[in-house]
Image (cartoon, grey):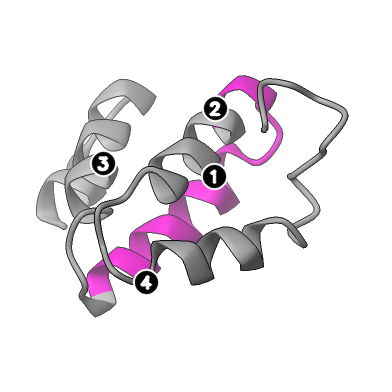
Amino acid sequence: MQQFRSADNMTDQFAALAALAQTECAEREQALADFYARWQNEALVVDKWLAVQSSSRLPSTLATIKKLIDHPAFDYNNPNKV
């Protein structure tokens, strides 16, 4: 989480987010929310945000995907998001 918070660019921040996405912890949810809040106007970055959640190895990933389908950033008509 320290790496996520101290990152000064999207690539470093995303690398930390990708690590957190594989861990069931409160920091994971906070980092996902913060990352989306910061980058929500960058479509390609939002695609990465969706992908990192849907490719997690956590047992809760299917439930996460079901929630993401209803997220405003998700669009079945955009192959990058599917």
Q: Secondary structure at mark 3?
A: helix
Write the residue at 51% across / 71% down: 63
Which residues fall within the magenta stretch? 27-45
Q: Find the distance from the CA under tag 3 to the CA under tag 1.
A: 16 Å
The residue wearing badge 2 is: 45
Q: Amino acid at mark 4?
A: Ser
> Upstream in the sequence, badge 2 or badge 3?
3
For this orientation, the residue located farthest to the right is 77
The residue wearing badge 1 is: 38
Q: Quadrant of the N terminus?
A: bottom left
Q: Secondary structure at mark 1?
A: helix
Residue 18 is tagged as 3
Q: Is residue 82 above or below residue 70?
A: above
Q: Secondary structure at mark 4?
A: loop
| Mark 4, other Cα within 10 Å: few <14 / some 14–19 / many ≥20 | few
Which percent across, then down, holds residue 23? Answer: 17, 63
